[in-house]
Amino acid sequence: MSGSHPHNFPKLHNAAWPGVVGKGGEGGDPPIGLDTMLDLTAAAEVDGIRFDGFDLFLFQPHIDIDASDDEIRVLADKAATRGLAIGSVVAPVWGATGGGSAMDEGEGRRNFLSQVRKGCRIAQRLRELGIRPHGVVRFDSACGPNEWFADPAGNQAKIAETFRQAAAIARDHGEKLAAEGEICWGGMHSWRSMLDLLERVGEPETVGFQADMAHTLLYTLGENAPEDRILPPGYDWKDRAVLDEALKTLTSALRPWTMDFHVAQNDATVFGSGSHDHTGRHCLANDPNGKLDIPHHAGFWLRDDDGYLTKRLRHICWDGCMFPNSVMMKPETWNDVLAAMIRVRDAHGWAE
């Protein structure tokens, strides 16, 4: 806190997973190690303010989902020596990482729940070590919209049952689960489907929503669900009032379920293949093509319908997935991100 920045909540986190997600493979940038990601995060500073912590993908080369207690303790020490807390963690529930589809009632579900259990174990241990004061375990349905559309009602019911079983696991570990709102996940590909799924699960104290400003913007466009589009076809992005109204509709529905929040920017373009698996691009905080007014539109998630702070989220995180390594290795990238996060907290934060 300072005289010009009087708030110290919500805490400001950077994400470590952009060093892993989209990295590797033929012709791709190599992964950026966890130590490097943490050093870049800890070094960022704007007006004397630094990041308070980071959120973590429970995946190699950052950390093994089967990490031993000693390895978890080393991770906690990495954070502590840099003055960083650990917040939300991402469980690798997908088939390619040892998990399985939440729509699969057999081996896929068993593998999915096994990864959730392992993720909750690490999250619980970090909490017990005192390095993780807040945060959730993030997951998704680990299946694509194309598969889901083969039997929408039946598949939605299967995902809901898997999520209910995951909720029991989370409770056993004293944890909460947040379903990632991204249009590439079956049953979660539109805001109405996401809301329907959360209501079917019926565990609002344990299973909630993880809102990412970049991804949820695409909900308003109905990219994978035209019937759930909120913005009118041919929308002119210069008409900010129309965008605000669309985001009010979206956030009014999903905010009550929101347990985790990513500050991000989006240029409203998508990439992917097929008709139902497009997803959104994260942009740099100062990208001139970004369609969001970051501090203004963050308030739609951080304040209720009457404009009052909810204070439900103890930390917020920047998500910068898919930036090239040449961008991520520049200190000014993380200073720009931190500056955007500070603006959000100045506008929608509080002091404790």
Image (tube, rainbow, N blue to C red):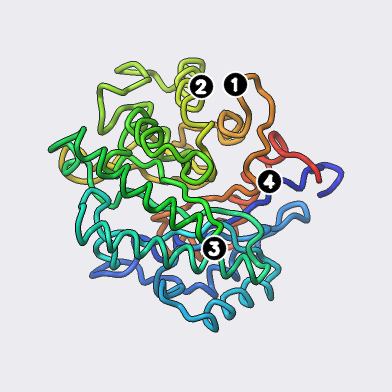
First in sequence: mark 1 vs mark 2:
2
Residue 241 is left or right of residue 311, and the answer is left
Residue 248 is left or right of residue 27, and the answer is right
Q: Identify residue for label 1.
A: 305
Disc 2 secondary structure class: helix
Q: Identify residue for label 4.
A: 10
Does residue 165 lie above or below 200 as drawn?
A: below
Tell me how far mark 4 sits from mark 3, CA to CA. 26 Å
Does residue 117 lie above or below 259 as drawn?
A: below
Pointer 2: residues within 10 angstroms few (<14), some, or many (20+)? Answer: some
Disc 3 secondary structure class: loop
Label 1 amino acid? Asp
Which is in the foreground here, disc 4 or disc 3?
4
Residue 311 is left or right of residue 252, and the answer is right
For residue 125, which quarter of the picture? bottom right
Which is in the foreground here, disc 3 or disc 2?
2
State the mark number for residue 330: 3
312 or 190, which lies in front? 312
* Residue 83 location (% of width, % of height): 71, 68
Pointer 1: residues within 10 angstroms few (<14), some, or many (20+)? Answer: some
Tell me how far mark 3 sits from mark 2, CA to CA. 35 Å
Tell me how far mark 1 sits from mark 4, CA to CA. 19 Å
327 or 235, which lies in front? 235
Label 4 amino acid? Pro
